[in-house]
Amino acid sequence: MPAKDTYYLTTPIYYPNDIPHIGHGYTTVAADVLARWRRLRGDRVHFLTGTDEHGENIARAAAKRGMTPQEHVDEINPRWHDMLSLLDISNDDFIRTTETRHTARVQDFMQVLYDRGDIYLDTYRGAYCVFCEAYYVADELVDGQLCPVHRRPVEQREQENYFFRLSHYADQLLRLYDAEPSFVQPAVRRNEVRSFVESGLQDVSVSRVSFDWGVPVPWDDKHVFYVWFDALLNYVTAIGYGNDPGAFARRWPADVQFIGKDLIRFHCVYWPAMLLAAGLALPEQVYAHGFLLVGGEKMSKSNATGIRPAELVDHFGVDCYRYYFLREISFGQDGSFSWESMEARYTTDLANDLGNLANRVLHMVGTYCGGTVPEPAAAAGDAEAALAADLRSAIDGMAAFDRLDFKKGLEDLWIGIGAVNRYVEARAPWRLHKQGDTGELGRCLYTSVDALRIIAVLISPVMPDAAARLWDKLGLHEALSAQRYPASVQPGLLPVAAEVERGKLLFPKLEG
């Protein structure tokens, strides 16, 4: 059996009860940036996303539209692919939980748990939120009757279900959180999960009989599996569990699983317990980011804050969209979106700091050197040494992406971009040209274009389109996709006589 050789990361699979909003885009872009970053690091990467298409909520939504559940999800599913294309997402696979490659393996996995005695039949009574597809105990309800997530009335239910012996795994889970603190991140989420488990775990229902839109229970066809025990398994069914042992061995366990903080119970309690029961390895890390807020409210359709990604991409472009959320918000914490703050980031960080820098430098190479990168004839001096130190800090700072601290990595990179702008101002190539000092002019312009080369590589995980356009301006023959961190971002690798082109602005002035 082959050994694991692939960096495997996942988004939660999204519930296709409506079109995607920027909250979905936030998670997906963060995962994509990590995937691109790890490829830049030289890793083999497998990046999975998809849609969660079973459950009572889907069945009800379809009925309201006069459609079958399958027709409903089939119609909505292309909108999720449109979002991936719009946001330049580089996922390697897209799983739908209605696919046979998933449903058959769900039955296989759950049969293992049943055969081992971890699933049994009983009657359940309790408060149920259709929108969460989850039961809640009385202490968790708001005002004794509202779902703590959706703030909508819960339903009181009593029905015969199959149950998973979750309570048997409480001690193992607590030992896991203590022995592997990186398993649940950030730390505040681990503390929440640990507190939840310490308070006492109840066995959890894994089947339903009140509707039939789900994966049938193989040993009792009156039941379908509870949607969460179906959905969570996508992370293994998509990569060969029960079907392609070689592919599964190369990819599992997952290195990072991205979720929103409202999903921690399912991913940090139910999911590891299921894997422990089946004898499978656990993910290395589940990272629960905060909510994306608009006007102080969590992003959702129900409270009219469900902004579509296309609304922002049409105005700001995909590069700004991808950059803004990771630069503006500390990943892991709640963060607020506003049109005004996004406009400020575009104008200051992208148009002025980066775009204007590239435009000025390439214009001067075109004007003073005929568009050809000059020989750095003069020796590097104090100004070059200072810039090299600042760029080194920016290069090293990008390693914050490994910790999913995207904000810190981008802050350090922009300090480096600011250092290049200061270098150009201090060296004043326009004066060197006027003075006829070709040696110093060559050194200054070579150093400046070389810095743009480094910047293009470093921004590529976050802004792949802008990075590609900048790379093309630099006239480099080696493909941007062939660059690797940190080897390709060392100073002095720019080939002399490369033919650069100023071209169009990287970040033109916003309209309207």
Image: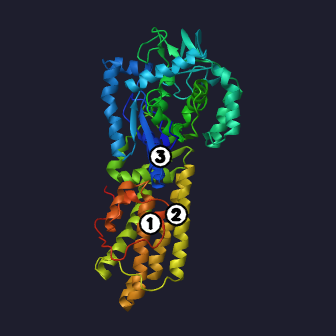
Evaluate whether residue 372 shows in this view.
Answer: yes
Residue in the picture at 67% in, 36% down: 177
Residue in the picture at 66% in, 21% down: 167
Numbered disc 1: secondary structure: helix
Q: Quadrant of residue 467?
A: bottom left
* Amino acid at pointer 2: Ile
Count of number-bearing discs: 3
Label 2: which residue? 395
User: How far across and down, in percent of the image, does residue 33 sit?
Assistant: 46, 49
Residue in the picture at 31% in, 71% down: 500
Q: Nearer the viewer, mark 1 or mark 3?
A: 1
* Amino acid at pointer 3: Ala
Reading the chain from its start, which is encountered first: label 1 or label 2? 2
Name the residue at the front extreme: 1
Evaluate whether residue 153 shows in this view.
Answer: no
68 with respect to 462 (left or right)? left
Depth check, front residue: 441 or 118: 118
Label 3: which residue? 30
Numbered disc 2: secondary structure: helix
* Amino acid at pointer 1: Ile
For label 2, the crowd category at 10 Å Cα-Cα, with few meaning under 14, some 14 to 19 and many 20 or more, is many
Specify the quadrant that holds the C terminus.
Answer: bottom left
Depth check, front residue: 402 or 156: 402
Q: CA distance from mark 3 to mark 2?
A: 20 Å
Question: Are discs 1 and 2 less than 8 Å apart at CB?
Answer: yes
Label 1: which residue? 454
Seen in the picture, residue 89 relative to 354 is either above or below; the reply is above
User: How far across and down, in percent of the image, does residue 45 sit?
Assistant: 45, 45
User: How far across and down, in percent of the image, does residue 23 sit?
Assistant: 45, 40
Numbered disc 3: secondary structure: helix
Residue in the picture at 38% in, 91% down: 435
Depth check, front residue: 155 or 241: 241
